[in-house]
Amino acid sequence: MNPDSKDSLNKSKTARGIFFTLAGGTMWGFSGTCGQYLFTYKNLDSAWVTVTRMICAGIILLVLAFIKQRKEEMKEIMQDKRDRRQLFIFSIFGLM
């Protein structure tokens, strides 16, 4: 591998890392501001907001996984009974 292409690849990864870090921090702050608005002005329960956030994040992650991975690989997870059971148990109790 050419040293120049290796350096270019490292710079590209660094730039992506910086972008995703800044985007994540911005989204985290925006989420907190939205949550505060909902608690203060709409009198929503914090448990409801938390559950809704987690469900939306899970759906987004599943969609991204289906896009990034081949659909066949994602279907394999659901075909094994043991994997299905572990996934279900984690989805219910893993984040409590």
Image (tube, rainbow, N blue to C red):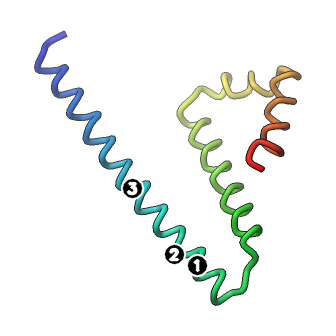
Kindly state the secondary structure of the residue where label 1 is placed. Answer: helix
Q: CA distance from mark 1 to mark 3?
A: 20 Å
Instruction: Specify the quadrant of the image occupied by residue 61.
Output: top right
Q: CA distance from mark 3 to mark 2?
A: 15 Å
62 is higher (above) or lower (below) than 57: above
Residue type, label 3: Ala
Q: Quadrant of the N terminus?
A: top left
The mark nearer the N terminus, 3 or 2, is 3
Labelled pair 1, 2 in contact (Cβ < 8 Å): yes
Which residue lies under the disc numbered 3? Answer: 23
Residue type, label 2: Thr
The tag on residue 8 is: none
Mark 3 Cα-neighbour bin, 10 Å: few <14, some 14–19, many ≥20: few
Mark 2 Cα-neighbour bin, 10 Å: few <14, some 14–19, many ≥20: few
Q: Residue at x 76, y 42 (%)?
A: 94
Residue type, label 1: Gln
Residue 24, how many percent across, how many down?
A: 43, 54
Labelled pair 3, 2 in contact (Cβ < 8 Å): no
Q: Residue at x 82, y 29 (%)?
A: 86
Viewer-nearest of labels 3 and 2? 2
Kindly state the secondary structure of the residue where label 2 is placed. Answer: helix
The mark nearer the N terminus, 1 or 3, is 3
Residue 9, how many percent across, how many down?
A: 23, 27
Q: CA distance from mark 1 to mark 2?
A: 5 Å
The tag on residue 36 is: 1
Which residue lies under the disc numbered 2? Answer: 33
Viewer-nearest of labels 1 and 3? 1
Q: Residue at x 53, y 33 (%)?
A: 68
Kindly state the secondary structure of the residue where label 3 is placed. Answer: helix
Q: Nearer the viewer, residue 29 or 84?
A: 29
